Amino acid sequence: MNLAVVVKGILDIGLQKAAQIVRYSLQRDRLERAPRRKCAPLAPGPLQEANPIEGGALLRFANASLQVLFLTPDLVRVTWQPGVLPVPYALARTRWPPVEVTMHREGKGWALGGSSVSVTIRDDGSVRFYDPAGRTLRQDLPPERCGEEWHLTTRLQNHQCIYGFGEQSLGLNLRGQTVTLWNSDPLGGYTPGTDPLYLGVPLYVSLQPGTASLAFYENSYRATVAIGDTIAARFAGGALRAYLAFGPLPQLMERYADLTGRPALPPRWALGFHQSRWGYKTAADVREVAAGFQAHDLPLSAIHLDIDHMDGYRVFTTNPAAFPDLAGLAAELEAQGVRLVSIVDCGVKCDPHFSLFQEGLEQGAFSTLPNGRPVRAPVWPGWSAFPDFTNPQVRSWWGKQYRRLVASGIAGFWHDMNEPSAFTAWGSRTLPLPTRHAMEGRGGDHREAHNLYGLLMARAAYESLHEMYPERRPWIVSRSGWAGLQRYAWNWTGDVASTWPALRTTISTAISLGLSGIPFTGPDIGGFSGAPSAELFLRWFQLAVFLPFFRSHSALGTPRREPWCWGEPTLSILRDYLRLRCRLLPYLYTLAWEASRTGWPLVRPLLWPDADDPELCGVQDAFFLGAALLVAPVVEEGALERLVRLPRGRWHDFWSDAVYEGPASVHLAAPLERIPLLVRAGTILPLEEDNGLVLHLYHPGDGEGHGVLYSDAGDGDGPCRVDRFRLVPVEDRLELRWTADGEYPFPYQSIHVQVHGLEVDELRIDGRPQEPAQRFAVQPLAQVAIRLSHDSAPGRGAPEP
Ligand code: GLC
């Protein structure tokens, strides 16, 4: 390491903390010192016994056992032992109705038959999955055990695309990459290729024309997965348990959501814009930011309070001198429609005068060293202790602490440093591996609990908030987590560098998280750690309008970047995009509701509806937002147009209404004020405009069009309603058919329909003729018939030859 960097680092953090960091690093090394034992890989050995069990089979090999269990006809669980079974923290569901499975001897192995998938287990321990037509879906070589490690190699075919593994910056299709699953704080601004990041999920989807599958390894130990001609996964301990699902991608996501839970429906305000910065130090700073948004006519939903607002970085406290009346400030902001979100770090300052620390000590709430004493590591407050969230009593104790913040008007919680991160001078930046954890009473160490830490911190907060305030939906955004985090929290993608390549990688990171079950994510707009140019900030902002979590955040000491800091024309363009986000809210909220029922990500790869187009496998600079919108952000400096690969079907330019036919590659104009954006033909897009609702109808061609609108009070679990729209071609007419379910009254006074892609020649609303118009007013549940003009062929955009 560069000496100047070391010296600067020491000066920045202060001598006392620097000494703690060195002491901790030495202590961790001492604790982790263990003789390195070489191991000889051990195969399962010959099959000795195979017996049917309900829904599957149990096979005993000379050196290992294998249980194969069908949870549904298209979801199979495979468990190799020895090795401790996981505590099912990831799972939302552990009981499944029995599935009928046949078992018979076949060649040199056993065949298990279900209705959609069959499995053969050879006598050497290799396992294959087939579809009913006999096509191979997956092929595992006999696994190997090496000491406590498990190694599993799965064959891949040439055209298979591999997506997933939670938060990673290695690209969308991971062929040729090695992913590490060990939640880590990469420090500083991370750049594309940094591995691992804060939130790994041991899951991938594999896509190729004709077949798709999902594999989720329920194993929280450190793992590396090398993805080349095969997928070679190595887990450092535990039993080797995998859930394997087969079917089209949307169905895979539903299966995974059945297993690990659906994302909680967020409060509606969380989908608005969040302004954050490490460095809002006082109530006056916060007021000034809110006033700036008002003065410049910029919509704002939340302001985040970083560690500066705490009293000496003590979690759950507020600096009384800087924030003398937090509740008053929160009420004042709430009257302007702005929520306050508070950071919550997991490290508790080891300070005998800090009541939370004292209470934690008395209750035995902290993770301990093997000698039974709480483990200490330096983070922001200096020496800190770390709650053991694998203990249900600790989760409940910790969860109650949020009450103080809620009483001060805090509406949402920002979980940070929860990999858990520790400041170190060298080596691994977390707790020592022998640290003990309760693991729900059965006991375990940090090797197993590490990757679960952020997930269980979120669970502690979510469950308590839900219990204490049943009338509100808890809102938490978490840096770390694991499979199942979606039940409790959103994510943001951490301390990313302020560079163009990092902007580009945001897209694949968000898609990967969504396919790993965690749909609500977003980046620090402009990157965390640097000084983005106005152009980079603007392009990042335009992208983030279409991501679930829409927040600007930056590191201490970076140049200010509230929208007005950029001057014109950037300020005006940012305002337009903030307004566009507000227009999109009905669509986004409907997608959030859809995700809470299906597990489908909001941000989807272009392969989502059409895994059969191999050209789309590597497209990582564009994505779908829901079914309707194809977003193609500008990710190159200076670019004023870009090439967009269109999937099959007809696409309408959102800005110009030009029409394109896919599959094709088209050049789309992208002056600074424009992000290329296309709408799928047949979409009925609900947008909020002028305090009313506008249903934008896009000509469905020969097929039918669809749209949905979900509405409720925006929080709590009161009544809701779902309006469904169909666009049906009937002879020379297009009929809009509108039905609704649910008790909630229709939330808009004014409703308009705007027709795109065809000239309205004749118009009837509820059977009565009207003056033809492209935009017209309707009442809820209106039935509309539009006669198309014969000369209304839409203006075509020119596909690239
Ligand atoms: C971590 C977080 C960052 C935050 C900072 C100070 O680096 O990732 O978002 O601003 O800590 O709390």
Image (tube, rainbow, N blue to C red):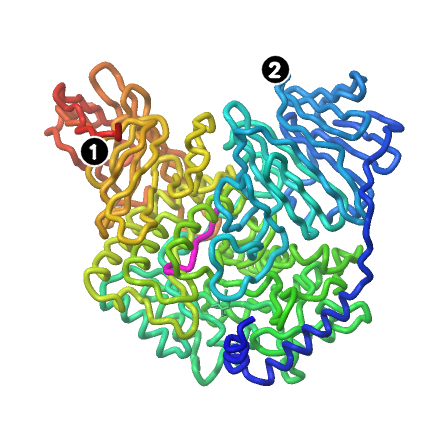
Residue 379 vs 720, above or below: the answer is below
Image coordinates for residue 770, horizontal then vertical, percent: 13, 28
Q: Is residue 35 magenta?
A: no
Q: Quadrant of the C terminus?
A: top left
Q: Nearer the viewer, residue 125 or 321?
A: 125
The residue that mark 2 highlights is 133
Q: Residue at x 31, y 74 (%)?
A: 288
Q: Label 1: few (<14), some or many (≥20) within 10 Å?
A: some
| Rendering coords of residue 223 (x, y %) | 67, 49
Relative image position of residue 160 (x, y in whole percent):
54, 31
Q: Which residue is mark 1?
A: 658
Characterize the magenta stretch by its predominant secondary structure: loop
Is residue 71 rendered to the left or right of residue 612? right
Left or right: 165 in relation to 395 = left
Q: Residues within 10 Å of mark 2 (few under 14, many from 20)?
A: few
Dot 1 lies on which element? loop
Left or right: residue 16 versus residue 501 is: right
Q: CA distance from mark 1 to mark 2?
A: 43 Å
- Position of 313 with respect to 434 (left or right) is left
- The residue tagged with tag 2: helix, strand or loop? loop
Kind of residue sitting beneath label 2: Ala
The residue at the far left in this view is 771
- Could you tell which of marks 1 and 2 lies nearer the N-terminus? 2
Q: Which residues are magenta?
A: 519-526
Q: Give amino acid for label 1.
A: Ala
Image quadrant where one finds the N terminus: bottom right
C-beta proximity under 8 Å, tags 1 and 2 = no
How many numbered marks have been drawn onto this rendered protein structure? 2
Q: Quadrant of residue 91?
A: top right
